[in-house]
Amino acid sequence: MPQPPFIILDSVTKRWSNGATVLDGISLQAERGEFISLIGPSGCGKSTLLRLLAGLSGLSSGSVRLDGMLPESAREIMSFIFQDATLLPWRTVRSNVELGLELEGKSTEAQRRKTSTALLELVGLSDVADLHPRQLSGGMRMRVSIARALATQPKILLMDEPFGALDEMTRDFLNEEVLRLRENDQFTTFFVTHSVAEAVFLSTRILVLRAKPGQIAREIPVPFPFPRTADLRSAPEYLRLVGEVSAALRAVQVPSNPLNPGHP
Amino acid sequence: MKKFLIQAAWPLAVFVVVVTAWDLSCRWFTIPAYVLPPPSAVVRAVVERHQTLWNAFCITALEAGGGYLLSILGGVIIALFFAQSPLIRRSFYPYTILLQTVPIVAIAPLILMWFGSGLRSVMLVAFVICLFPIIANTTQGLISVPRNLIDLFVMSNASRSRQLLKLRLPHALPHLFVGLRISAGISVIGAVTGELFASSNAVGEGGLGYSITYANSQLQTDYLFALVLTASLLGFLFFFTVTTLEWLCLRKWHESAMKTDAD
């Protein structure tokens, strides 16, 4: 008997209490280890979709199954990485990385320490393990946030524009780091972003969403094999695909004259 | 250390100028000592009556300190209760504002009537006056945790009590300290005001407030000055203690403490 898909969304619809439809009939399936980027104009519901998957927000109709479970029950195999690093400022870097494990309450202090040591090594933050978040740069904070998310060994990683607030160099660097981390651990990822280049660089598949109501407008597979390196960014096929996704994104933008809004 | 000395030099200079001006005006304008005693007379009063002054200081410190500690305990418990739901806050918050708006001099006679005179009643006045800043600030801290941090705890299946212990309480700590700083000074005001109404009259049991009314009635203005200065010193001591404690708790991670570092 063939295994059912790892993640199944079946005509997922979300309406706000004022009746506005944010997401309208989203259906998709994802296999283990996929890296799916969600891209689209603001208001297309991409962040809302992520919150539905996380069980942080309820659906109005349709169904979501993650490894056969409802979102609320699947939290143990999921980690969420937020737009800002959301570190606890009173904890040290190390202690922040250990937070998820600590809240799970299934590990001893020694085990947690071992995990955090390994992860801090992996994201290159061993030197700052005992510092507090305010002593770090934005990029370093985000790396702590990623290390914290990976500490619980999630099977599913939900990332909500994690690099949106960073400068381009730091963003590129962290993109490469995400690829490297994925080689160790084949987590399935949903990645919300505004950056086409980032989406093409990281993903196995890109979903272009349109707004009002939020629907999947196009699905674009990214065929480049893994492991990928920074060199990919200058490859012609990469640039061609970036162009294609940009065109798809332009097609779903509500046409409007930026100099005279309201008069398309 | 050198930097500290330079910083301390300015307020010290102000002190010297003010005291000199005070002394000179007493001499030049021949102001009677019962209206404005010269600094030397105040110093003499402190030296000669240091025993009774120390005694009064201890009593007021006990009253103000006791009321203050009680208000921390009560205030944090009430804030925890308020943090439970917006409905609770909406229902009870207006009444806590009353604590702040009703003049303490109006409450003090009532407390005297209900609980009699003595140390406990004075402590109660200090408690009442200290309570509101602590409730208001701690509640604010408990409910102002960023949405994402709460989601993070929800994603980790953290229970309500863990969320409180590991997220809300530490997040509220800087806010609590704001309340503690405000209340530190006013606890002494509360105790002194309370003593004007409800102090025990027994010999040796009156605090600074009681002694102030006594010195006033006897026209011992030099001693009155000594008492007032002692009361201010007590408030300053409380404030200094809390500020030090705050620095110790927050210096590593909180922005406010970081700024003092940089100065």
Image: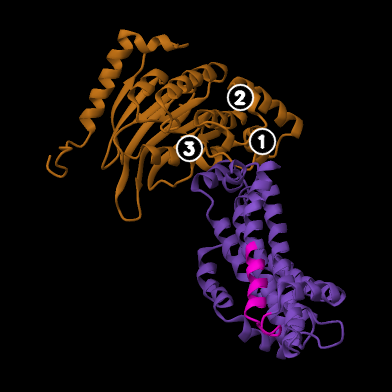
Chain colours: A orange, B purple
User: Does residue A244 belong to the magenta stretch?
Assistant: no
Q: Amino acid type of disc 1?
A: Ser
Query: Splitting the image into 4 quarters, where does residue A110 fall?
Result: top right
N-term-proximal mark, 3 vs 1: 3
N-term-proximal mark, 2 vs 3: 3
Q: Which residues are magenta?
A: B17-36
A15, B55: nearer the viewer: B55
Kindly identify which residue carries mark 2.
A125
Q: Amino acid type of disc 2?
A: Leu
Chief SS of the magenta region: helix
Q: Residue furthest left?
A: A263
Q: Position of residue A10 (x, y in %)?
A: 38, 36
Please name the residue shown 53% across and 43% down the image.
A72
Which disc, if any, is residue A84? 3
Quarter occupied by the C terminus of chain B: top right
Give the secondary structure at mark 1.
helix
Disc 2 to disc 3, C-alpha distance: 18 Å
Visible residue check, residue A2? no
Same subunit, labels 2 and 3: the answer reads: yes
Disc 3 to disc 1, C-alpha distance: 18 Å
Same subunit, labels 1 and 2: the answer reads: yes
Q: Position of residue A30 (x, y in %)?
A: 43, 26
Kindly identify which residue carries mark 1.
A95
